[in-house]
Amino acid sequence: MPPGAVGTTTSDGTSDAQPVRIAAVSDFDPTTDSNSDGEENPDKVPLATDGDPSTAWTTVTYYNNPKLGGLKPGVGLLLDLGKATSVTGVKVTLIGQPTSLELRAAPEDVTSAPTSADQLDVVASAPNAGLQADLKPDEPVTTRYLLVYLTKLPPAPGGFEGQIAEVSVSG
């Protein structure tokens, strides 16, 4: 399996999941505050899928509270698979811990990028994850858009900051 691919192992030791190509990735910050321009370091987004776990997309630094400073419910990365695709899981490599995150999926018939987290359904979650989060829905989900949504950030110098070093999708 190529680096960054996610697979599950069956009882006989073989993998039954295949890597899913991510067509595009963008930062997702639909709820802005007075100190925000609605973006979460868009210039660093490519670092979450560059195959190098020593580089990462990072959120901005939030203060006073690991739940994004109490300013918003979450931020993250919106993955566009290019077309409706069956997804069995998403593997996320994180820097810093604990991080709480959700995997959200747009309905199968959605053809344009969601602009609100409410437009996507929570299909898996990892509260207080360590350095790896394997987000696996109970059943495969067919979607074009996935949101890796950070809802609680780990401590960082001066505040709280989420960091996604790598993200990969399997189906």
Image: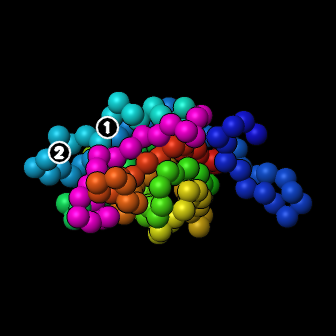
Hey, which residue is sitting farthest front in the picture? 157
Taking the view exactly as shown, the residue that stands out farthest to the left is 34
SS at mark 2 in the image? loop
At x 28%, y 50%, the residue is 61
Foreground pick, 143 / 3: 3
- First to last magenta residue range: 51-68
The residue labelled by disc 2 is 36
Residue 88, percent from left and from top: 62, 55
How far is the residue under mark 1 from the one under mark 2?
Answer: 11 Å
Give the percent coordinates (x, y) of residue 34: 10, 49
The chosen color scheme is rainbow
| Amino acid type indicated by mark 2 | Ser
Looking at the rendered structure, the number of numbered marks drawn on it comes to 2
Q: Is residue 35 at least partly visible in the picture?
A: yes
Q: Pointer 1: what residue?
A: 41
Can you give x and y, in whole percent of width and height, for residue 145 in the image?
44, 45
Q: Is residue 58 magenta?
A: yes
Q: Is residue 102 visible?
A: no
